[in-house]
Image (tube, rainbow, N blue to C red):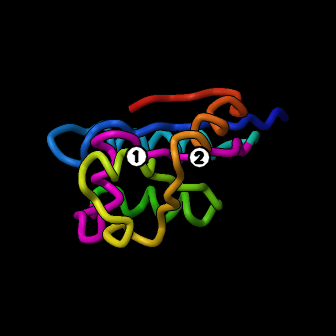
Amino acid sequence: MVQRSVLITINRPPYGSIYYTEGLRAAVGVTSGIDENIVTVVYLGDGSYFTLKGVDRKDTDKYLSTLKKQGTRLIVQKESLQERGIKESEIETDFEILPTKEILDLMQRVDFTMDF
């Protein structure tokens, strides 16, 4: 069995498309199976809107619940929040806020990335 480190980025807003839902579904899929890969989900750009308190997540709750149980890190880029005038206090507590430098370091250490 080979365990890999996988980074999934969600770059699109949580409305108007299925990319944010499919990204989380893919994250759950990657964590399943024999290898049980280590997955990290990072919200960048307009994807950062998904991390706001009060966002309707009924179509993604089951995926988020599964990922949390498996210890998946859910991260939002600090600069994406700043560029959109979003305060850190407006972000759900389930999401870590990291600066670009730390996210880039993480990207260099993973075995595989998927963008949604």
Q: Which residue is mark 2?
A: 40
Residue 87 in the image: state x and y as whole percent.
32, 64
Q: Quadrant location of the C terminus? A: top left
Answer above or below: position of 103 versus 84.
Answer: above
Which stretch appears magenta?
A: 36-58
Residue 47 shown in magenta: yes
Front in this rendered view, residue 106 or 79: 79
Residue 78 shown in magenta: no
> Which residue is found at the position 28% from the left and 53% from the top?
49
Secondary-structure class at tag 2: strand
- Measured Cα–Cα span from mark 1 to mark 2: 18 Å
Front in this rendered view, residue 48 or 15: 48
Kind of residue at badge 1:
Glu
> Which residue is found at the position 44% from the left and 56% from the top?
63
Residue 71 in the image: state x and y as whole percent.
64, 61
Kind of residue at badge 2:
Thr
Q: Quadrant of residue 39?
A: top right
Residue 30 in the image: state x and y as whole percent.
59, 39
Q: Which residue is mark 1?
A: 79
Answer above or below: position of 69 versus 15.
Answer: below
Front in this rendered view, residue 52 or 37: 52
Q: Is residue 3 left or right of residue 47?
A: right
Secondary-structure class at tag 1: helix
Q: Quadrant of residue 57?
A: bottom left
